[in-house]
Amino acid sequence: MNNILRKAPLLLGFVLTVSMAQSPHSVFIEELTWVEVRDAIDQGKTTIIVPTGGTEQNGPHMVLGKHNYLVNYKAGEIANQLGDALVAPVVAYVPEGDIDPPTSHMRFAGTISIPEDVFADILEFSARSFKQHGFLDIAFLGDSGGNQAAQKIIAEKLNEEWTETKVRVHHISDFYPGRGDDWVINQNISAEDVGGHAGTHDTSSLLYLNPSMLRLDQMKLGRPGDGQGHTGNPAVSTPEFGERILKMQIEDAVDQITKERLAIRQ
């Protein structure tokens, strides 16, 4: 009995620690149980953000999972700022070019590509799933240019179908590429250095969030057709640029979601 009493404080501490670690405060549904998701919806968290990224080459200085990492972070921040939203798993498989013969990013090792109609189906049936569970606002958040067309098409298709319901799908067009590139150019960085793929925008974001995803000794100017895979000069990137770019994207997405939700229900 004395041995049990001596262990009681340790057991209580363990239970409290585990309980705190498992507290369902995450906005990511992958980190919640189905009961916690159900209860969150019942308590008013009826917006779901569907982040779309991609597994693609990003030049010799940046890992292939860049989009997935960045969009997951930004979606989480957007959900936290909205206060009544959850985040779906990142869609990491998106159109990246033809497979055989390879075009676009598929010309580089590691890229994964799916047909446009397959990507559209993933978006559509993800949205249908979330509608079934009680979400009222489904926001497609695309971190890559190639994701935008299908997001827009599926949002319009489902909104037309669901016009007599309270459910709406939002293509968050203000999010990507956003104001970041123009802002960096205004900081006296040339448009060539800013680039259009894996350049200053993404490199700066990762310098701010997670430099381990970069190969700092490989950051040099890339030009279209030079075989490196990126355009722009990542060497001019800074964490300060990244912090500002991320803030603008998150802010613009929050504003668009908020405005569209209000417009629908006025």
Image (cartoon, rainbow, N blue to C red):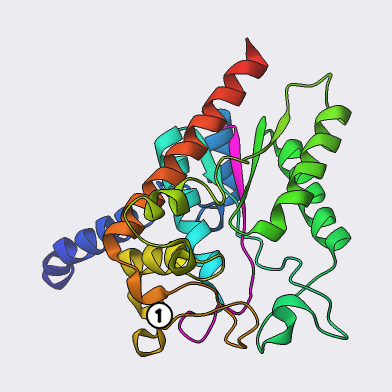
Q: Which residues are magenta?
A: 44-62
User: Residue 75: x, y in percent?
Assistant: 50, 49
- Magenta run includes residue 123: no
Decide: few, some or many residues near mark 1? Use Cα within 10 Å; few <14, some 14-19, many ≥20: some
Quarter of the rendering occupied by the N terminus: bottom left
Main structural element of the magenta stretch: helix, strand or loop? loop
Q: Is residue 44 visible?
A: no
User: Residue 48: x, y in percent?
Assistant: 60, 41
Q: Observer-nearest residue: 146 or 210?
A: 146
For the point 54% across and 82% down, which residue is it? 59
The answer to whether 33 appears left or right of 163 in the picture is: left
Quarter of the rendering occupied by the C terminus: top right
SS at mark 1? loop
- Magenta run includes residue 54: yes
The residue indicated by pointer 1 is 214
For the point 79% across and 56% down, which residue is it? 122
User: Residue 11: x, y in percent?
Assistant: 23, 64
User: Residue 256: x, y in percent?
Assistant: 55, 31
* Badge 1 amino acid: Leu
- 105 is higher (above) or lower (below) than 18: below
- 159 is higher (above) or lower (below) than 86: above
The answer to whether 69 appears left or right of 118 in the picture is: left
Q: Observer-nearest residue: 32 or 254?
A: 254
For the point 31% across and 64% down, which residue is it? 208
Q: Is residue 217 visible?
A: yes
